[in-house]
Image (tube, rainbow, N blue to C red):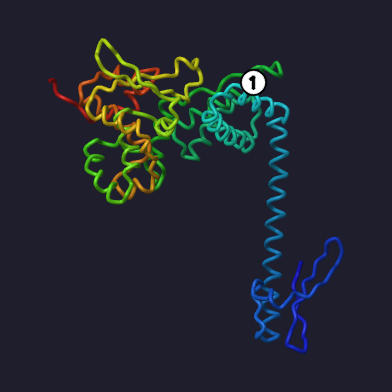
Amino acid sequence: MGYFVRKSAKGFRVIEQTWTPKRNESVVPTQAYSTLGFRPDMSLIEAKLRASQLNKQNIIESRKIIAVAKRIQDDKETQSAYLPQILTEGFEAELKENYADNPERLDNLSKQWTTVKKIITELAVDTKNFYAERQRFFNYYKSKKWSPDYIKKLNRLLNLYGQYVAKKTGSYYQDIPKLSPIIREKIIELRDNTPGLKTAADPLEWLDLKNKKSTFEHESLLNQWNWLFIGLWFGLRPKEIDSLKNKNTWRIETDRFHKIEVLHVYQAKLTSVSKDKRWKPIPVYLDEQKEALRVLKTGQFKRPLNKTLKRFFDWKIETYSPRKGFTDLMLERGFDLEDISIFLGHADISMTWKHYKNKMAFKLPG
């Protein structure tokens, strides 16, 4: 497609020329001039110059389209070699079947699977060579500066796919190993020394949240403060707090021995256990927890945006921060780490210690 300017009685006229399916010319209406950068009061020379600019832009865009089309074709050829369609579709179908009752988990896995397919395509590695090429995988991870936790998830999915292919084709497969402590430390150090890289949220402390309540109220954002309040005193994941709007995801039971109420919250992300074992107990023991339960029952809470939190707090507070602050808050109130791990819904206390306990915080006896 191209534009040409011809002299006319009124000064000039713009002709649009196309070549599909055959050469064709049409006069551009005057009212359409402004969209193309022409003006009726232009001189003939100015109009021809503008037409030349448009044609150059069209050539550049055409070349971009051709380059993109070629890259897509190359990717398809590479994928067909290292990600056979019949195997990838079968693996995806198996994932959907295994996580049909947990759409949240399935959505996360689908995003990770997209990344995994890109890794396999870019490295051009066949599944039977995953273990032999493990160093290339590790180098790729380091170049992307992904977190060790994210790498662990990708590695797991790579191995699941490799195991699936081996099972379907009767071939041998050896898992890509976990990151060694040395490689893990190098990745952490690399991320720490990269400015502007997204890092983990800081824990939210009760005193800081308490002091911000009037500010939230002043801006008519009390529901968002309530969301943080519930999350902090019950140690819930962001999506668990959101799910409390649905009364099927939580229930209250009375512990007659301790004479307290116990909040039970359904953990949708636990897909490896039966549904009846996905409930975690949280005792409503402290006065602040009793108030948080009252707010929960009203339904007057709403997840705040991270940009809102950034405006209200001077440090890295995000929607995961209330859960990050729960462990030390409960330790300060006298609970044991083993029990706090249960309240958080962790299968292993080491998870609570490694990722949720502030290693610089301590309390004195009594």
Residue 146, position as x, y percentages in the image? 47, 37
- Graded by Cα atoms within 10 Å as few (under 14), some (14 to 19) or many (20 or more), the crowding at tag 1 reads some
Residue 130, position as x, y percentages in the image? 60, 26
- Residue carrying label 1: 164
- In the image, taking residue 79 as reference, residue 314 lies left or right, namely left
Q: Residue at x 71, y 64 (%)?
A: 59
Camera-nearest residue between 231 and 110? 231
Residue reaching furthest right? 22
Instruction: Report which quarter residue 58 is drawn in.
Output: bottom right
Residue reaching furthest bottom? 9
Q: Residue at x 71, y 40 (%)?
A: 76
Q: Is residue 278 above or below residue 236?
A: above
- In the image, taking residue 365 as reference, residue 348 lies left or right, namely right
Camera-nearest residue between 109 and 227? 227
Give the quarter of the figure containing the N terminus.
bottom right
Instruction: Report which quarter residue 359 is drawn in.
Output: top left
Residue 169, position as x, y percentages in the image? 71, 19
- In the image, taking residue 321 as reference, residue 10 lies left or right, namely right
Instruction: Report which quarter residue 131 is drawn in.
Output: top right
- In the image, taking residue 356 as reference, residue 97 lies left or right, namely right
User: Which amino acid type corresponds to the residue marked 1 in the rendered image?
Assistant: Tyr
Residue reaching furthest top? 257
